[in-house]
């Protein structure tokens, strides 16, 4: 093998190794605990992490298509978490009609000035499949946390959170959301919860090889929704 070819191969190997090193980022684990005003764990709070290093993506991305059912006068699930651009499918499993009207969460009411989308879903005919209706959430700044209600049945409430960050999760019954393989370095923590009408102050976190835990406390005690299915 001549010297010129050897030098060329060496440069190629070094360039490849350098490229891999530049694209690699050390990872860490961050757990966020969400508790209510009394210090009890909160289920179905949305935790959004925004790392300073935005070049790294989660190994398991947010689901780009979800189905929200209307069943027994409820939205199931009560809270859905999706990425911006996700497709949301609505189906009505009740034998009577439902109407879906959306509004930015926290507005407190539905009216023509804050409506996001409107749907009317026919009741399910016995022995026949439900008729699905799809929408696309393509504007996080406008949609964000969306409140859904039914004009026909005023007690029905549901929420969809469209996250701009790929690092987002809902808390479980233990009030925890755990993020693995986050890029090391500073990160910002944002928490949203349906009954928390005043924004929770964002927290700063430092992600490293040592697992870390941050606690975010709400200023309210979320009300228990009758018959809610999580």
Image (spheres, rainbow, N blue to C red):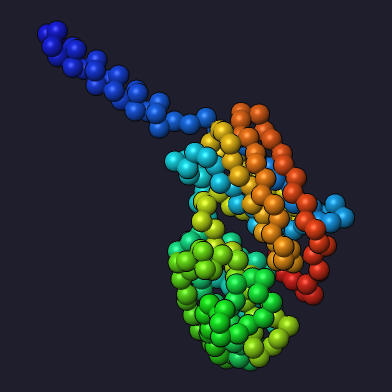
Q: Is residue 86 above or below residue 8?
A: below
> Which of the pair 61/204 is nearer the observer?
204
Q: Is residue 27 above or below residue 131?
A: above
The quadrant in which residue 225 appears is: bottom right
x and y percentages locating residue 153 in the rendered image:
69, 88
x and y percentages locating residue 17 in the rendered image:
34, 23
User: Is 208 positioned to the left or the right of 220 in the image?
Assistant: left
Residue at (56% x, 82% y) in the render: 113
x and y percentages locating residue 51 in the rendered image:
55, 42
Residue at (14% x, 7% y) in the render: 3
The number of discs equals 0
Asked if one can make out residue 38 in the rendered structure from this viewpoint, the answer is yes
Residue at (47% x, 42% y) in the render: 54
Residue at (56% x, 85% y) in the render: 112
Quadrant housing the N terminus: top left
x and y percentages locating residue 164 in the rendered image:
51, 56
Quadrant housing the C terminus: bottom right
Q: Is residue 71 above or below residue 54?
A: below
The quadrant in which residue 196 appears is: bottom right
Q: Is residue 93 above or below residue 19?
A: below
Asked if one can make out residue 69 in the rendered structure from this viewpoint, the answer is no
> Which of the pair 150/37 is nearer the observer?
37
User: Is 224 positioned to the left or the right of 131 in the image?
Assistant: right
């Amino acid at each position: 093998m001549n010297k010129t070819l050897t030098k060329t191969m060496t440069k190629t190997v070094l360039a490849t190794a350098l490229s891999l090193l530049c694209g690699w980022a050390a990872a860490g684990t961050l757990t966020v605990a969400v508790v209510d005003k009394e210090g009890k764990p909160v289920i179905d709070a949305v935790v959004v992490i925004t790392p300073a290093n935005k070049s790294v993506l989660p190994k398991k991305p947010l689901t780009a298509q979800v189905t929200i059912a209307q069943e027994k006068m409820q939205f199931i699930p009560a809270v859905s978490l999706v990425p911006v651009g996700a497709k949301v499918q609505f189906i009505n499993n009740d034998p009577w009609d439902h109407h879906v009207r959306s509004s930015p969460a926290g507005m407190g009411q539905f009216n023509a000035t804050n409506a996001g989308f409107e749907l009317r879903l026919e009741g399910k005919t016995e022995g026949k499949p439900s008729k699905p209706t799809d929408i696309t959430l393509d504007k996080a700044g406008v949609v964000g946390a969306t409140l859904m209600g039914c004009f026909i049945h005023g007690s029905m409430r549901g929420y969809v959170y469209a996250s701009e960050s790929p690092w987002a999760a809902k808390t479980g019954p233990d009030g925890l959301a755990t993020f693995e393989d986050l890029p090391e370095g500073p990160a910002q923590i944002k928490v949203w919860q349906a009954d928390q009408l005043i924004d929770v102050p964002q927290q700063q976190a430092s992600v490293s090889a040592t697992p870390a835990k941050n606690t975010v406390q709400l200023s309210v005690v979320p009300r228990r929704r009758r018959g809610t299915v999580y």
